[in-house]
């Protein structure tokens, strides 16, 4: 359930909603500054620019908690899936040069690719748009339960996906998969006869003057880099280093390191047609008709809002570059903590201040208020707040706050939050599953069984509930 929750939180954060677009005013930077300064526990750096002029740049929190080393505006952070932006630009550069086309299939460049169906039917375009059907190696048991040190190169990952069946027929649906961009990286190498890192250094980083960006080996020394911290599953209310939780080296799918200035340089180079000509820049930033993801680009607004860029997140990592085209603003946001430890708050407040409020933003901040009321004043007062408001609860954000309480060891507070969730989302099997977990953590076995069973009744395919009930009833 936790993996599902994490992915859903990530998806909802970049989903499309209706917007009011208003020009940014100077006093709005003051509002943003005051808000960011008030955030409890946020750790990272933020840059805001307008008309290619930096209006705001500031660092918060610690790069190294053990030695109390503070973040600074030059600190490097893991940029997670922002790396997909670089890979997409590289592919379109090669298309621009006539080296390949969007309709070329994998087999044209990787003739020995093991899965014939993928080799013959998955195209460059489907890889870019996450519509290939390739399996998700990043969440496979082989990857999760093996030392990440074994997967330092693209070649070392091939056995995790090449011999696996497709998840669905190509172009049948959207499914965000790192596998797609690993394959794109391999294709870049096959065409250019250059290592992927050398290609992007020469054709992207050097052009954009990005001197502090790279796919570093994270178990080696990285100058002025922040450590990543996530709330531990094993030790309540403790922050845990994430070095064993993700890839050991950056790749075409992401995981490299950069700082706010370099990512700002990239965003400027991109929008000013320095990396691609106007035709291919416009192609990359053109919003798809019925989706939020295009050619390596995410679109975080309603149709026509003019907001594009790319975000990324993992345990103890959050990153984003976004261009607000109608306001001619750019925002770079980096953190070395979990997404829900200030990153989302910062992102959504900045978005609201620059481009106007939306139902999604209103509901996010309303749910935040409800959760705080529940934690500080109790569930009955939270119900009163809900009753007296016209805003809607966000189940995803309420659920995420509940899991934060579990990680902090505040099981009764988690029970209250999940109780609110099942009360206002009675058809959600995940809500009952989460409440069952909170009761289990609190030692209330009977109530845990009751809620896991309700979850299973709502969704007979909930394997987590099946496994938990089997264990609980066998004791």
Image: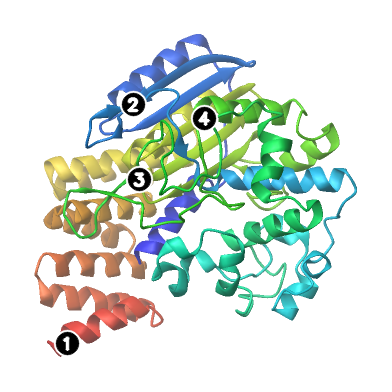
Q: Are marks 4 and 3 in contact (CB under 8 Å)?
A: no
Quick check: 170 above or below 306? below
Q: N-terminal of the two: label 1 or label 2?
A: 2
Q: Nearer the viewer, mark 3 or mark 1?
A: 3
- Residues under labels 3 and 1: Cα distance? 34 Å
Whether residue 348 appears in this view of the structure is no
Q: Nearer the viewer, mark 4 or mark 1?
A: 4
Q: Nearer the viewer, mark 1 or mark 2?
A: 2
- Residues under labels 4 and 1: Cα distance? 50 Å
Label 1: how many Cα within 10 Å (few below 14, some 14–19, many 20+): few
- Residues under labels 2 and 4: Cα distance? 14 Å
Which residue appears at 53% of the width and 27% of the height?
Answer: 331
Quick check: 309 above or below 219? above
* Residue picked out by circle 3: 338
Secondary structure category for the residue under label 4:
strand
Quadrant of the image containing the N terminus:
bottom left
Q: Observer-nearest residue: 127 or 90?
A: 90
Q: Are marks 1 and 2 in contact (CB under 8 Å)?
A: no
Label 3: how many Cα within 10 Å (few below 14, some 14–19, many 20+): many
Q: Observer-nearest residue: 256 or 359?
A: 256
Secondary structure category for the residue under label 2:
strand
* Residue picked out by circle 2: 60
Whether residue 253 appears in this view of the structure is yes
Question: Residue 473: which disc?
Answer: 1
Q: Observer-nearest residue: 461 or 165?
A: 165
Q: Quadrant of residue 128?
A: bottom right
Secondary structure category for the residue under label 3:
loop
Question: Residue 332: which disc?
Answer: 4
Q: N-terminal of the two: label 4 or label 3?
A: 4
């Amino acid at each position: 359930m936790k993996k599902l929750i994490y992915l859903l939180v990530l998806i909802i954060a970049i989903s499309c909603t209706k917007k009011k677009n208003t020009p940014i005013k100077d006093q709005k930077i003051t509002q943003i500054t005051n808000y960011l300064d008030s955030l409890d526990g946020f750790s990272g750096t933020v840059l805001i620019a307008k008309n290619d002029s930096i209006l705001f740049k500031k660092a918060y929190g610690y790069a190294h908690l053990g030695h109390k080393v503070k973040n600074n505006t030059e600190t490097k952070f893991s940029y997670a899936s922002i790396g997909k932006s670089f890979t997409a630009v590289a592919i379109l550069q090669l298309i621009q040069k006539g080296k390949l086309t969007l309709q070329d299939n994998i087999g044209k460049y990787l003739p020995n690719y093991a899965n014939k169906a993928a080799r013959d039917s998955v195209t460059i375009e489907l890889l870019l748009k996450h519509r290939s059907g390739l399996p998700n190696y990043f969440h496979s048991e082989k990857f999760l339960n093996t030392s990440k040190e074994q997967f330092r190169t693209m070649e070392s990952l091939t056995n995790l996906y090449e011999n696996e069946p497709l998840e669905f027929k190509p172009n049948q649906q959207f499914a965000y998969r790192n596998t797609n961009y690993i394959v794109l990286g391999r294709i870049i190498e096959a065409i250019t006869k250059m290592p992927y890192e050398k290609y992007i250094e020469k054709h992207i980083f050097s052009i954009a003057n990005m001197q502090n960006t790279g796919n570093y080996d994270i178990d080696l020394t990285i100058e002025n880099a922040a450590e990543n911290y996530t709330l531990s599953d094993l030790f309540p209310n403790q922050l845990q280093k994430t070095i064993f939780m993700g890839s050991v080296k950056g790749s075409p799918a992401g995981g490299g390191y950069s700082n706010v200035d370099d990512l700002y340089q990239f965003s400027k180079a991109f929008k000013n047609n320095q990396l691609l000509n106007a035709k291919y820049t416009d192609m990359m930033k053109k919003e798809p008709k019925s989706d939020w993801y295009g050619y390596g680009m995410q679109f975080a607004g309603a149709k026509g809002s003019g907001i594009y860029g790319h975000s990324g997140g993992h345990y103890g990592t959050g990153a984003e570059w976004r261009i607000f085209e109608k306001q001619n603003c750019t925002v770079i946001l980096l953190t070395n903590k979990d997404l829900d430890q200030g990153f989302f708050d910062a992102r959504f407040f900045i978005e609201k201040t620059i481009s106007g409020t939306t139902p999604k933003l209103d509901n996010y901040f309303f749910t935040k208020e409800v959760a705080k009321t529940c934690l500080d004043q109790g569930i009955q007062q939270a119900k009163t707040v809900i009753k007296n408001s016209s805003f809607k609860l966000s189940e995803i954000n309420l659920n995420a706050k509940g899991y934060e309480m579990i990680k902090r060891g505040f099981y009764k507070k988690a029970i209250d939050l999940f109780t609110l969730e099942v009360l206002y989302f009675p058809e959600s099997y995940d809500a009952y599953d989460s409440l069952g977990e909170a009761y289990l953590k609190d030692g209330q076995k009977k109530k845990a069984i009751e809620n896991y069973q309700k979850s299973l009744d709502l969704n007979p395919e909930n394997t987590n509930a099946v496994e938990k009930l089997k264990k609980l009833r066998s004791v």
